[in-house]
Each structure stands twice: as structure tokens, then as C-alpha cells.
Image (cartoon, helix red, strand yellow):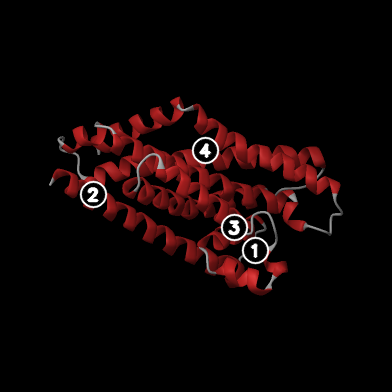
Amino acid sequence: MNRIFAFTRRNIIELLRDPLGYIFCLGFPLIMLIIMTLVDQSIPKEAVTVFHIENLAPGVAVFGQMFVMLFTALNVSTDRSGTFLMRLYATPMTAADLTAGYIIPMLIIAEIQTVITFAAAFVISVIIGSTLSIGGMILCMLTLIPSALMFIGIGLIFGVLLNEKTAPGLCSVVISIGSFFGGIWFDAQRTGGVMLTICKCTPFFYCTRSARSAMALSFTGESFVLPLLIVVMCAAFMIALGCLSFSKKMRADLG
């Protein structure tokens, strides 16, 4: 446990030293929150409900988690490209210790990011005269934990399988696909048709839907329970696959 704590502490320090982390993990989601709120104030309220602050905040929180995926992949791939991980392989640390040391700090960063996003959303709601449920925000933050783990798992897989030049590019593709087919910037339910079918084939759609349902304190099976269950299963699969990939890569490097 001490080994995991020490490695976790090192990774948190490395993240805090990187100014790009503040820009992409905190700055960019907050900027999008403000811009889309201004858009919402400029159009008829009934036209696009997805930009209402109670729907926008959960979507932006999911959007921000995608950048945590990017930095997970970058952190792991950068350590692999140097001699840092090779030196760690010579220590008593196991693959489980190393993967936990990557996952835990990223989860902490993701939760801090989520808290800041909702704090900003609450301030915005006061300014524009809207109302956000405190209970809904707390439940939404808890609901977003599985989706954070899912994105961290994807980042871990990319970081293990790709180098530090390729991993960020592929993460950018996932961010673009996830933000679109996740229904973050449009209402997939209202769109319907083929677009909704495609969205439902991705886990990103269920991340956004479960988060928005939690925010609205709507607990029906189709809108909350089923989407959350899908996200939990995807998170478990991605974390397990990431850990397995890391373990195999570690054995290959040592062999």
C-alpha cells in the first residue's frame, strides 16, 4: 500500500506541474460552460433545451472527463518511452501497484474537475436566475465516477499500446466522437432516427444520459438505471483490459 501511495503522489505532482493539465482539464470545460450558457441566453428557451444549465453542466462534466483520458494516456506513454518505468520494474512494485498508481490520481483529478465544473455551474445559475438542485448536483457527481473510470481505463489502454506521439492523437479522435455521439452538444433523444441509434451504440451516450437524469433526480429504469448499469460495465471492462494490457506489456519488457 505504501508503494501505491508513493507512486500515486508522484503522478499527482507530475500532473500539477503540467500547465496543459490546467488548460484542458479545467480551463477548456469551464470556457465551454460559459460559452454555451451565453448561446442558451441568446436563443428561445424552447428551441434547444440541451444548453439549459441543468442539462449543460452534466454534459460538460462528461466532456471534461475525456481530457482526463488524454492525460492518462500521455502520462503512461511518456513514462514508457523513457527509462522511468524500466527502473520501476526493478523494484518490488507489481503491475497492480503501477496501474493503481496511475488510476487513483487520475480519478482524484477527475473528481476535482467535476466539483469545479458544478461549482461554476451553480454560480452561473445564480447569475442567470436559474435554479440547480444541490441534491441533484451531488448525485450527479457520484454518478459520474463510473464514467471517469471508463475514460481512465481507455487512456490507460492507449498509453500502454501507443507511444507518446500517437496516443494523444487517438485520444483526440475519441474526444471528438464522444462529445458528438455522447449527445453533449445536442439532444440525441429529440433527434431520433439513425443518429439516436448510432449514439446508443456508444458508451458515451449513456454517460451523458445517466448524468443528466441524476441531475434531474429522475430515476426511471430507461433514463437512469439502465444507462448507469451500461457505464459501470464499460468502466469495469476498460479498467480490467487496461490492467491486463499493462501487465502483459510489463512481462514483455522484462522478458
In the rendered view, does 172 fall on the left or right side of 249?
right
Q: How far apart are marks 3 and 2 (CA)?
A: 33 Å
**Front-lying residue, 83 or 71:** 83
Q: How far apart are marks 1 and 2 (CA)?
A: 43 Å
As drawn, which residue projects farthest toward the bottom? 193
Residue highlighted by disc 3: 208
The local secondary structure at tag 4 comes to helix
- Point out the tag, 4 or 2, that comes first from the N-terminus: 4
Residue highlighted by disc 4: 112
- Point out the tag, 1 or 3, that comes first from the N-terminus: 3
Residue highlighted by disc 2: 249
Q: Which of marks 4 and 2 is in front?
A: 2
- Point out the tag, 1 or 4, that comes first from the N-terminus: 4
Picture residue at 44% right of the left edge, 54% below the top: 150
Q: How far apart are marks 1 and 4 (CA)?
A: 24 Å
Q: Nearer the viewer, mark 1 or mark 2?
A: 2
Residue highlighted by disc 1: 218
Picture residue at 32% right of the left edge, 47% below the top: 160
Establish if 32 lies above or below 6: below
In the rendered view, does 85 fall on the left or right side of 103?
left
Mark 4 crowdedness (10 Å alpha carbons): few <14, some 14-19, many ≥20: few
Q: Residue 157 carries which label?
A: none
- Location of residue 74 (image quadrant): top left
Instruction: Give the amino acid at mark 3.
Output: Thr
The local secondary structure at tag 1 comes to loop
Q: How far apart are marks 4 and 3 (CA)?
A: 18 Å
